[in-house]
């Protein structure tokens, strides 16, 4: 039987001698071309051991993104499917987008409060009526239809016959600044000695409860490696962010799955949205969603579009004026992308110490070193202290760093305030930041961050599957309280 020579085969010889037919010729271009991975036929002539770098080059450095919520908030356990909290309403009475009748006898001073709000302005109240163009008139309310709008209040200006004569045009705003009664006049009468008329009763203002809710969602991930690959070593030395080391490649894959999942725990709390009736996802049967940070600020907070150093300090002062109308929390933290952080640096470069501003580190016990060690730099403007730092999540090219234009998120301002609440788990009063995570936990099960092994490899003996399955699970949501004190910076 003839033996056809093949690459790697040797034609036998009766004598022990070196022949061209019974050894591999490395200078044979046809043989060398078989080693396609060597680049060329001439590369196959290099019969010496190459210099091999066993460790991966860490060209992206530390790739993990989590840490934002740990810096600005806390994590608290919960035992229910829903978390509910109440937020106070404003103390004073004011209405926006009101209209007033065209000039005419008896109707010129009728103001209509729009639908969707409840009128609680009493007769004899004194109000300021103002438009968007700088005109205003102080008025006495002579009669008022209380209740759900649209309803009408009738007013008489103090210094003009009509609201139009006072220069008011278009939609107006109304707020109460006090009341005025004549001598001997009693409430709820509209005039001295007169019986209460319909729509002229004094209103007892009851505080309204404003509640917000959020619900936890279940986050899961898994890594699977078969038993054979677990017993196989590679030539690349594994070294990951969490300190895993060795020549077993599956260690790297398992470690990266864990790190990726830990990032997801934070990214979900930042990016998630609730399912709405208009959404394509079906509520309950497909998903329920949860309110993330960006969604909460967009729905209940403040959005600053197109912040730029080119505008100087004026853009930032616009934010301060808006904060004055909200909770006016003194200390705030700024988490910014690179471009916006540089804009802030350019802006601050024009501020000198003194009345224009300066540096501040009150949140860090007035220690500049402590602030810098945590990655913050502080400055003061007006009556506010701000501490800014880069947010890696907004710079990473595989997350928000890949977005530009109106869809881009360029930063977020987070108040550093806290509230006091009673914690049922701890049984004590605790200080809780405005921004914090609630995770599902009880004495029976803690679902903050669970991991477990299944299969029959790697120390697991739960099934006949010839593999190791590493499972990850968490159930959590973000609580964004007093979102009116948060600011979201968006691109243009």
Image (tube, rainbow, N blue to C red):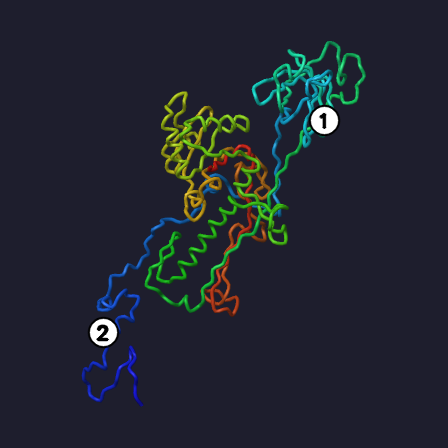
Which secondary structure, mark 2? loop
Q: What is the C-alpha distance between the residues marked 1 and 2?
A: 98 Å
Residue at image coords 77%, 12%: 192
> Closer to the camera, 105 or 158?
105
Q: Which residue is mark 1?
A: 151
Few, some or many residues within 10 Å of mark 1 (<14, 14–19, 20+): some
Residue at image coords 62%, 48%: 81
Image quadrant holding the N terminus, namely bottom left
Q: Is residue 231 above or below residue 437?
A: below
Few, some or many residues within 10 Å of mark 2 (<14, 14–19, 20+): few
Can residue 111 be seen at all in this image of the molecule? yes
Q: Which residue is mark 2?
A: 28
Measuring from the top left, give residue 198's x and y in whole percent: 79, 22
Pointers 1 and 2 in contact (C-beta within 8 Å):
no
Q: Is residue 27 above or below residue 216?
A: below
Q: First in sequence: mark 1 or mark 2?
A: 2
């Amino acid at each position: 039987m003839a033996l056809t020579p093949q690459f790697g085969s040797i034609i036998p010889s009766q004598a022990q001698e070196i022949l061209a037919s019974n050894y591999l010729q490395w200078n044979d271009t046809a043989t060398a071309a078989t080693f396609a991975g060597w680049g060329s036929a001439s590369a196959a002539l290099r019969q010496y051991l190459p210099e091999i770098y066993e460790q991966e080059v860490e060209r992206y450095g530390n790739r993990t993104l989590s840490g934002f919520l740990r810096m600005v908030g806390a994590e608290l356990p919960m035992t229910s499917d829903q978390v509910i909290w109440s937020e106070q309403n404003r103390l004073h009475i004011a209405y926006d987008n009101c209209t007033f009748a065209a000039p005419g006898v008896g109707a010129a001073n009728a103001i209509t409060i729009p639908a969707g709000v409840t009128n609680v302005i009493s007769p004899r109240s004194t109000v300021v009526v103002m438009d968007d163009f700088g005109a205003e008139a102080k008025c006495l309310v002579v009669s008022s239809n209380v209740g759900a709008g649209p309803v009408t209040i009738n007013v008489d200006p103090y210094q003009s016959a009509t609201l139009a004569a006072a220069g008011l045009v278009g939609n107006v705003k109304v707020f109460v600044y006090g009341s005025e009664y004549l001598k001997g006049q009693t409430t709820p009468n509209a005039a001295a000695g007169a019986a209460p008329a319909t729509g002229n009763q004094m209103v007892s203002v009851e505080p309204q409860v404003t509640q917000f809710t959020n619900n936890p969602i279940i986050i899961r991930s898994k890594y699977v490696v078969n038993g054979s690959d677990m017993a196989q070593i590679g030539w690349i030395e594994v070294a990951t962010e969490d300190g895993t080391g060795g020549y077993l490649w599956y260690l790297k894959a398992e470690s990266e799955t864990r790190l990726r999942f830990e990032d997801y725990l934070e990214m979900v709390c930042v990016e998630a949205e609730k399912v709405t009736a208009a959404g394509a996802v079906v509520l309950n049967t497909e998903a329920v969603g949860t309110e993330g940070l960006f969604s909460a600020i967009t729905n209940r907070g403040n959005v600053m579009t197109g912040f730029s150093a080119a505008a100087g300090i004026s853009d930032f002062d616009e934010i301060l004026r808006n904060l004055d109308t909200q909770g006016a929390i003194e200390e705030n933290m700024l988490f910014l992308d690179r471009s916006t952080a540089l804009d802030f640096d350019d802006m601050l470069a024009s501020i000198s110490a003194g009345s224009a501003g300066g540096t501040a580190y009150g949140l860090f016990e007035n220690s500049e070193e402590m602030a810098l060690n945590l990655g913050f730099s502080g400055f003061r403007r007006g009556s506010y202290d701000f501490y800014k730092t880069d947010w890696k999540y907004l710079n990473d090219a595989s997350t928000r760093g890949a977005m530009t234009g109106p869809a881009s998120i360029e930063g977020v301002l987070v108040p550093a305030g806290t509230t006091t609440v009673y914690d049922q788990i701890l049984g004590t009063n605790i200080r809780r930041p405005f921004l914090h995570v609630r995770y599902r936990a009880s004495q029976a099960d803690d679902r903050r961050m669970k991991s477990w092994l299944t299969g029959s490899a790697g120390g697991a003996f739960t099934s006949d599957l010839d593999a190791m399955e590493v499972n990850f699970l968490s159930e959590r949501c973000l609580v964004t309280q007093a979102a009116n004190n948060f600011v979201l910076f968006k691109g243009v």
